[in-house]
């Protein structure tokens, strides 16, 4: 078995040497994950920019359509992400015969998720009616989602197969095919949105077709690669077909549903905050969205380290190396905190220049600069919570962390943010900054609770559970 990406620990080395070796392994695993995450973000940027150049209605339709499919996709993506620590654990334990059965159960879950998403998104008109959208924009939104739905099976299939590739430590595979999807998305958007090569101009609807095709091409190419690759040929994805197994599916869902729900809770909270801020006017909303975009972009690095940490911890638990699993879990907090301090410094020092990159409006710039100062303050709490929850997922501990995140965001962060934004209970209303203070409080609550859980649990206890 290839140990280039997931080497067994060398316990005879010094503590410092072992720590640096584990950090190097995280970098090898996490680097491609970071590029894949950025490629997926680039797809959204490409869609937004190119739809915006078509018309304001097309831009609005694609934006609304994306806000409707994204939470559903994130939920099912979270469920399927349970495959990564499961397969990584089997890899560490060298129980390779369990890998393909688990992969196939993930494929069945992806197929079921695809059916649910397609049915919901192709019959979304009641939701659009409730939003009281302008009729033409609503028509474009429904057309965009109907076209986009054709690519949903490919998207979820790639996420199921990511459990296999990432679980075996080959994170570059999904990186390559994410980049392939992005490379196809740009020209296909141009062809379908603006009507090239003899096709009619479809505007925002063309965005949906372009995304579907690019995802389908990437998924088919991934299947071909897995079938022909020397590395994955031994697993014989198609030849080692496995029937649906309720116990196997239940095991994945037991771990994955809390992850999917946690991601859904986070993403929905930011959507709710945007809705609450709408009465404060477009300048405030614009400044909030810019600050949120900056923070989301910066978050890609600690998130990628966290995803790599999940893979590494689950591998070490499977390999019966609990001491090294504990070492990498705790030392990663130092690494993540160092990144957070750099981020905080950059946000404090360059907030004005960052805002200027996004807008020339002085009012929007002022709001953005103020909010970025609050964003700088919650960086440490943010990276600590994602590092802790990632390590816990490596130990296959997902239910309690889900409850911690739910409490921190929806019981602490959002209510406090609302009070500070709109009321004078704790002093003069802070406006949009109130929600960022609430976010900070929620993240501090999450980081402390998750950190306590991570340090309280011993790897030996979780490994045998």
Image (cartoon, grey):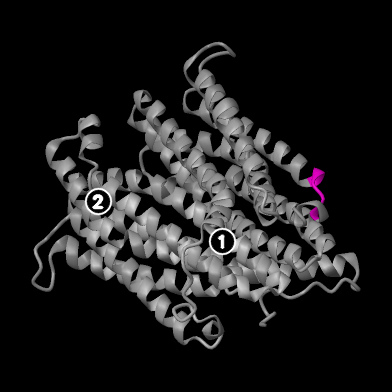
**Circle number at residue 289:** none
Q: Which mark is residue 83?
A: 1
Q: Over which residues does the magenta segment extend?
A: 455-459
For residue 7, side relative to residue 263 (left or right): right
Q: Choose between 263 and 273: the one closer to the eye.
A: 263
Give residue 320's quadrant in the image: bottom right
Relative to 186, 243 lies left or right: right
**Residue 405 higher or lower than 48, as above or below:** above
At 67% from the left edge and 49% from the top edge, which residue is drawn? 397
- Whether residue 354 is in magenta: the answer is no
Q: Residues within 10 Å of mark 2 (few under 14, many from 20)?
A: many
Name which residue lies at 31% across and 67% down.
185
Q: Is residue 30 left or right of residue 462?
A: left
Nearer to us in this view, 28 or 148 = 148
Location of mark 2 (residue): 145
**In the depicted structure, whether residue 50 falls above or below residue 123:** below
Q: Give the residue at the far top of this rendering.
A: 425
Snapshot quadrant of residue 377: top right
Main structural element of the magenta stretch: helix, strand or loop? Answer: helix
Between 76 and 290, the residue placed more toward the observer is: 76
Q: Residue 445: x percent and y percent?
A: 67, 33
Could one spot residue 130 in this view of the protein?
Answer: yes
Kindly identify the residue that appears in the image at 55 percent across and 66 percent down.
102
| Residue 341, horizontal then vertical, whole percent | 69, 48
């Amino acid at each position: 078995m290839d140990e280039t990406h997931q080497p067994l620990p060398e316990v005879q080395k010094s503590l410092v040497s072992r720590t640096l070796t584990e950090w190097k392994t995280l970098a090898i695993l996490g680097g491609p994950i970071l590029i894949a995450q950025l490629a997926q973000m680039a797809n959204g940027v490409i869609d937004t920019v190119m739809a915006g150049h078509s018309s304001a209605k097309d831009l609005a339709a694609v934006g609304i359509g994306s806000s409707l499919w994204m939470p559903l996709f994130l939920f099912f993506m979270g469920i399927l992400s349970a495959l990564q620590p499961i397969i990584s654990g089997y890899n560490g334990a060298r129980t390779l015969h369990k890998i393909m059965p688990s992969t196939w159960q993930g494929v069945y879950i992806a197929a079921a998720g695809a059916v649910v998403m397609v049915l919901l998104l192709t019959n979304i008109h009641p939701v659009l009616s409730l939003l009281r959208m302008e009729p033409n924009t609503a028509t474009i939104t429904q057309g965009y989602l109907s076209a986009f739905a054709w690519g949903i099976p490919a998207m979820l299939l790639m996420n199921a197969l990511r459990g296999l590739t990432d679980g075996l430590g080959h994170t570059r595979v999904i990186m390559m095919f994410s980049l392939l999807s992005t490379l196809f998305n740009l020209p296909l958007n141009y062809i379908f949105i603006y009507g090239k090569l003899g096709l009619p101009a479809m505007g925002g609807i063309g965005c949906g077709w372009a995304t579907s095709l690019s995802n389908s091409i990437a998924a088919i190419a991934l299947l071909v690669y897995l079938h022909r690759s020397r590395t994955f040929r031994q697993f014989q994805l198609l030849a080692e077909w496995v029937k649906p197994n309720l116990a196997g599916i239940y095991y994945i869902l037991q771990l994955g549903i809390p992850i999917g729900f946690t991601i859904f809770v986070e993403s929905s909270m930011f959507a709710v905050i945007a809705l609450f801020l709408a009465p404060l006017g477009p300048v405030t909303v614009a400044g909030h969205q810019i600050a949120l975009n900056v923070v989301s972009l910066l978050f890609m690095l600690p998130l990628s380290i966290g995803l790599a940490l999940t893979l590494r911890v689950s591998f070490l638990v499977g390999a019966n190396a609990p001491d090294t699993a504990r070492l990498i879990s705790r030392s990663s907090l130092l690494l993540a905190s160092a990144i957070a301090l750099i981020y905080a410094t950059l946000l404090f020092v360059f907030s004005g220049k960052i805002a200027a990159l996004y807008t020339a409006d002085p009012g929007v710039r002022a709001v953005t600069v103020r909010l970025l100062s609050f964003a700088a303050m919650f960086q440490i709490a943010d990276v600590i919570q994602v590092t802790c929850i990632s390590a816990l997922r490596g130990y296959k501990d997902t239910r309690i962390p889900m409850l911690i995140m739910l409490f921190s965001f929806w019981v602490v962060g959002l209510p406090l943010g609302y009070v500070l934004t709109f009321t004078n209970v704790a002093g003069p209303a802070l406006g949009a900054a109130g929600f960022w203070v609430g976010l900070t409080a929620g993240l501090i609550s999450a980081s402390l609770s998750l950190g306590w859980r991570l340090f309280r649990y011993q790897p030996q206890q979780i490994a045998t559970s």
